[in-house]
Image (tube, helix red, strand yellow):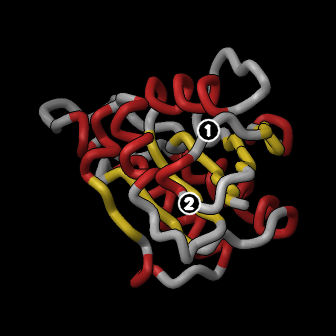
C-alpha cells in the first residue's frame, strides 16, 4: 500500500517586478499558513517517508516549512524541476519514479497539475485545491509506477484551521 500527500504551495507574492515566475516568494500570509497548517498536520498524520518539492521558490519554501514542522531532515528533501511544469503528466512521472522503499510521500507542487492529478487518481471530486491545501490519496498498489485509482483519505485547507 502507498500513501501520497500532495500540497499546493502556500500563497505567493506578486509584488516584485522583474523577477521570473519560478522565483516568486511566499507572502507573509503564505508563510503563516504553511507554519500553522504543517504544525497541525504533523500531529494528525504519520510523517511521510519522503518529501519532494518543485524547484520554484514558493513551493520550495513551503516544503522547507513543512520539513521543519515534521522534523524531516532538509538534507533529504528532494527537489524536482519538472514539478514546476504545472502539468499532471510531470506530477505522474515524479510519483511513478519514487523509490518503492518509500510507503508514503508528500509532494509540493502547483495548481493545475495538482487539481488534475487528484481528480484522476482520487475517488472524491475536488473542484479546486487552494494554496497550501493538502490532498491525501491511499493506493492499494505496492509499486509507485503501477498506481491506479486510489481512495482520497484527506482533503484539508489552512482556512479550516485559522
The image quadrant that residue 44 belongs to is bottom right
Q: Position of residue 83 (x, y in %)?
A: 34, 44
Q: Which residue: 78% across, 38% down?
A: 152
* Tag 2 secondary structure: loop
Seen in the picture, residue 70 relative to 59 is either above or below; the reply is: below
Mark 2, residue position? 143
The image quadrant that residue 86 belongs to is top left
Q: Is residue 60 visible?
A: no
Q: Position of residue 57 (x, y in %)?
A: 32, 51
How packed mark 1 is, by other alpha carbons closer than 10 Å (few <14, some 14-19, many 20 or more), is: few
Q: Which residue: 42% across, 31% down?
A: 88
Q: Which residue: 34% across, 39% down?
A: 90
Q: Which residue: 50% across, 60% down?
A: 63
How packed mark 2 is, by other alpha carbons closer than 10 Å (few <14, some 14-19, many 20 or more), is: some
Q: Quadrant of the N terminus?
A: bottom right
Q: Could you tell whether 52 is left or right of 85 in the image?
A: right
Q: Position of residue 145 (x, y in %)?
A: 47, 52
Cα distance between the residues tagged 2 and 1? 10 Å
The image quadrant that residue 20 belongs to is top left
Q: Are marks 2 and 1 in contact (CB under 8 Å)?
A: no
Q: Say which of 42 and 102 sits in front.
A: 102
Mark 1, residue position? 148
Extreme residue toward the left, this view? 18
* Tag 1 secondary structure: loop
Extreme residue toward the top, this view? 127
Q: Say which of 139 and 32 sits in front.
A: 139
Q: Say which of 79 and 121 sits in front.
A: 121
Amino acid at each position: 500500500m502507498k500513501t501520497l500527500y500532495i500540497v499546493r504551495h502556500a500563497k505567493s507574492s506578486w509584488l516584485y517586478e522583474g523577477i521570473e515566475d519560478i522565483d516568486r516568494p511566499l507572502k507573509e500570509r503564505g508563510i503563516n499558513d504553511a507554519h500553522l497548517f504543517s504544525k497541525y498536520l504533523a500531529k494528525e498524520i504519520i510523517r511521510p517517508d519522503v518529501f519532494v518539492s518543485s524547484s520554484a521558490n514558493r513551493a520550495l519554501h513551503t516544503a522547507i516549512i513543512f520539513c521543519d514542522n515534521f522534523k524531516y531532515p532538509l538534507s533529504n528533501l528532494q527537489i524536482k524541476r519538472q514539478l514546476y511544469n504545472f502539468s499532471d503528466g510531470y506530477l505522474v512521472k515524479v510519483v511513478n519514479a519514487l523509490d518503492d522503499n518509500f510507503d508514503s510521500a508528500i509532494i509540493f507542487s502547483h495548481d493545475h497539475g495538482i487539481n488534475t492529478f487528484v481528480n484522476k487518481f482520487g475517488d472524491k471530486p475536488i473542484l479546486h485545491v487552494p494554496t497550501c491545501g493538502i490532498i491525501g490519496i491511499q493506493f492499494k498498489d505496492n509499486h509507485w509506477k503501477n498506481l491506479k485509482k486510489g481512495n482520497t483519505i484527506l482533503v484539508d485547507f489552512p482556512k479550516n484551521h485559522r
